[in-house]
Every structure is written in structure tokens, then in C-alpha cells.
Amino acid sequence: MNSLMSIKDRINFEKFYLYATLFFAFTLPLSRTAVSFFILLLPIVFILEGNFKSKFKLIWNNKPLQAIVLFLAFNLLSLLWSEDYSDAQNVVRLYGYWLVIFTLALSIHKNDIQKIITFFLYGMLLSELIAYGVFFELWSFKHATINNPSPFMFWIDYSVFTAFTSILLLSRLFSNNYLKKEKFLMFLFFLSTTGNLFLGLGRTGQVALIVAIVVMIILYLKINFKSILITLALLLSIYGAGFILSDTFKTRVNSAVHDIENIKNSNYDSSWGIRVVYWMITYDILKENPLFGVGIGDYEQTIQLFLEKKSYPISEATKDFIAKSHAHNQFLMILIQTGFIGLLLMLNIIYQLLAMRIKDDALKKLSLLFLTIYFVSSMAEPLWLKQFTLALFVLFVGIFVAANQTKIYPAK
């Protein structure tokens, strides 16, 4: 115990949180191992720091953190009506990532937040250079290919990262806080990031970016004739160029149109069709488990059960795929696992994050754009069940809540 106290006395917690978060932000787009390391390290040091009474008080007086506590508590409570504890353990492990939100929210100084965001951009820049090197056949890298040059993560996840990076840079271009030289470099970075988004297969980020651009124009220019023209010009130039210059994007757009046509003809054996079937299955599950869901560990076996009980308009091959997968939608996953109570608690988190008071206007707008990208993307993929996208969530929610805090716990 004395040796532990001695170690604690030698740590400059304020500097530790800053440097650890900077490295976490930089390595987030680059390394699974680094993500796991910082996700574990930051809460351990936060616990080692002690002074829990003050910390609990700060957490409970902060509405976004309070909403997160209620959501996590109810999800843990759902273990009581879960039967598959192996899947439940994996979900609980991922919810453990959320501890980083509390660590950052109570430990990061507001004047360091932009620095942390910039380090994230450095990490994204490095990942993009690697991706472009693969695309132009300058080198090979892991599982990245010319047709899908996502270097470190699954292409859907990478599309969320690139979409957020694009809107982050675009919002800075609309801001008055940067010099012309800085904006020129940001513009080049924006072009490369957006180009990277259309090189990959990730339609999730591509769709989310459309919504985020509309939100961004409203935030910066309000709703008027000028803002409508700028929005249309941006969308047409970005997505028109993507369709003309990227064969991958063109193929994915044509595939989406084909999927929609098949759905109209009651053919659900496609990427978009499968997502519609998950809505059908969720509806049937909720009729039997409306308030509490089936528990956080039983979603897969429950989906399999309903595939056997009900007749859905899909082939046996599609049925086999659905039976072994998640619901491809974070909102549906919450409904299946914890019912309407869980969904309301999730929506409360979103509301509290949207309603946060952040004095820095640019940072407030960025928080709204991040939440737009993230939760629009969550309509197509369960981002809280995936390591990289969950880590993206805890990092940025953590620093946005830190900006919302009237004070932080004074590190020693």
C-alpha cells in the first residue's frame, strides 16, 4: 500500500491525462492494440488517482454523464434476464470502454481540446497516406486492396472515421478562427479525406456526410436561399465528383439502386434488403418483449429463434447470414437487447449530448456535427459493438463533455 501511495505521489496526473489522450487520439485511427492499451490505461490511472467522492459528485451533477450512468446500469441489469453469458460478457467488455468518457470528462482542460482534435487529424492523415499508397500500388498493407484501401479497420468503420474527418475539416473552413494559410492546408486535407471516403466501399459514412453537410450549413448560415444554394452546390460537387471519378462509388450507388428496386419487388436478398428484414425481426421480438428486451447477451440466439418461428421473404443463404450476425443498426440492437426502456435511455443520452452548453461556439457546432455523423451511421451499423467506432465515440464524447464541465477535478 505504501509503494502504491508513493507511485501516486510521483505522478503528475494533469500532464498524464493530456499526453495519454493526445497519443490515444493520434493512434485511434491506426492501431487496435493502441486503442486497447489506452482504453485500459486511462480508467486505471483515473481510479488510482482516487478522491471518488468528488468525482461521483461531478459525474452526478453533469446531465450527459448521468444519462450514461443510467443507460449502462440498465444494460448491466439486463444480465438478469439474459441466458447467453458468453455474448453478454463481450457486450459488457465493450461497455467498459465507456469508462474513458468519465475519465476524460473530469480530467481534460478545455484549452487542450483543440490540441487533442488536431492529434486525431494527424492520425487520420497518416492512415490516409497509407490508404492512398495502397490505392496507387506504391506498397501493400495488411488486408487493404486497390478496390478497398482501408488500412487498419473494416471499411464501414473507416467510412465513419473519414466522414467525420471531412465534416470536421469543412467546418473549420467555414470558421473564422483560422488564417488563410491554415485554411488552404485544411482544404487540401479535406479534398484528400473526402476522396478517400469515396475510394472505399463504405456507404454508411457517405450517407452520413450528406446529412452532416446539411446540418453544418444550417449551423453556420441558418436556413435561407443562400444556404440552400451552398448546400446543393457542395453536395452536387462532392458526390458528383465521387460518381465520376470513383468506379467503386459508382458501383456502390448502382448496387443501392438495384437493392431498392428488389425490395419494391419483395426481394430482400441484398445488403439493403437484409437491413429491412432486421426491422421485421425486431418488430416481432418486441411484440413479445416490449419493455425489457431479451437481455444484452441473447440477441443472436433470439434472432435465430424468430427465423425458425416466422417466415421471412429471404433465401436460405440470407437466413444463414442473418442468424450469425447482429442487427446492422445500433437502435435496433438496443431495442432487441433492452426493449423500449433501453431505447429511451439511449435517446436520453443523445438528447443530453445535443443539449450540452459549450461556450466555445466552434466546439459546440463540432459536437453537433459529430453526433450527426455518428448516429446517422448508427442507423446502418451497431457502432457501439465495434472497437474502433466505439473508441471514436468515447474519445469525442469525453472531450465534448469536458468542454461542458464548469470545472474538472484538480489533478495533483
Image: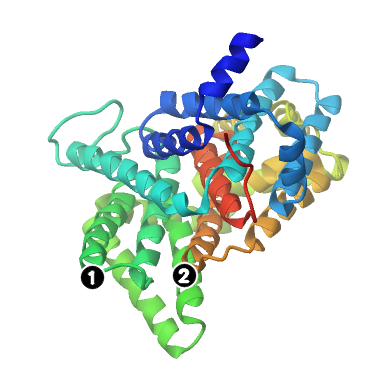
Against 90, is 16 above or below?
A: below
Q: For numbered disc 1, what is the local secondary structure?
A: helix
Residue 54 lies left or right of residue 367; in this view the side is right
Q: Nearer the viewer, residue 13 or 155?
A: 13
Residue at the left extreme, as displayed? 138
Are the two marked residues, 1 and 2, in contact with CB atoms closer than 8 angstroms? no
Q: Residue at x 46, y 76 (%)?
A: 220
Q: Is residue 331 left or right of residue 141?
A: right
Q: Position of residue 275 (x, y in %)?
A: 59, 46
Give the amino acid at mark 2. Answer: Met
- At horizontal 51% and vertical 25% (from top left) the residue drawn is 11
For residue 96, what is the image quadrant?
Answer: top right
Horizontal and vertical percent for residue 261? 50, 58
| Element type at mark 2 | helix
Residue 65 at x, y percent in the picture: 70, 47
Q: Nearer the viewer, mark 1 or mark 2?
A: 1
Q: Disc 1 and disc 2: Cα gap in Å?
A: 20 Å
- Residue that mark 2 sits on: 216
Q: Report which residue position mark 1 lands on.
A: 180
Location of residue 376 by image quarter: bottom right
Q: Is residue 88 above or below residue 196?
A: above
Mark 1 and mark 2 lie on one chain; the one further toward the N terminus is 1
Q: Residue at x 83, y 46 (%)?
A: 341
Please tell me which residue lies in front, 324 or 404: 404
Amino acid marked by disc 1: Lys
Q: Residues within 10 Å of mark 1 (few under 14, many from 20)?
A: few
The N terminus - image quarter = top right
Q: Residue at x 68, y 28 (%)?
A: 50
